[in-house]
Amino acid sequence: MKPIPINEKLVWDYDIPPDAQTNEAFREWYVKRVLTHGTADDIRAIGLETIHAYLPHLYLPQDIREFWDWYFSQPHAKQRYGNFDPLSETAT
């Protein structure tokens, strides 16, 4: 599991656990926070590979979900990150 940089400005209401890099619940929560409140720099920092891995497990606002579903359905994204089935998990 690749470490993800944590922008403490995005975690204003949550104590960062000491095991943040290995705590799957925190990592999933943080990726959602980046997608809903982060900047382009925050997205760049966690990387598209991380977003692709966590996206099927995240409940997101519809406009954000639709954007990322669209992005990962594009041929260049499929080639780089693999097929993405937004309905395979909890996507809505």
Image (cartoon, rainbow, N blue to C red):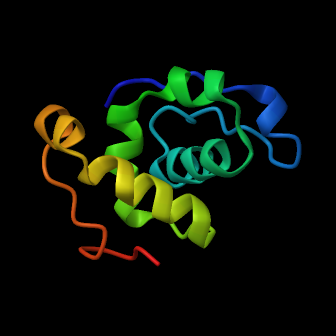
From this view, report whether residue 19 is shown above or below residue 89. above
Q: Residue drawn 35% across and 63% down?
A: 56
Q: Quadrant of residue 6?
A: top right
Which residue is pictured at 60% across the width and 65% down the height?
63
Q: Is residue 45 above or below residue 71?
A: above
Left or right of residue 12: residue 48: left
Q: Position of residue 77 (x, y in %)?
A: 24, 38
Q: Where is the N terminus found, in terms of image quarters? A: top left
Among all residues in the image, which is located at the extreme right? 12
Taking the spot 57% from the left edge, 21% from the top edge, the residue there is 5
Q: Residue at x 28, y 76 (%)?
A: 87
Q: Is 37 or 63 nearer to us in this picture?
A: 63
Q: Is residue 88 above or below residue 17?
A: below
In the rendered image, residue 48, in percent from the top left (x then y), is placed at 38, 33
Residue 37 % position (x, y) = 74, 45
Q: Is residue 59 left or right of residue 55?
A: right
Q: Considering depth in this image, is 17 or 57 the residue closer to the camera?
A: 57
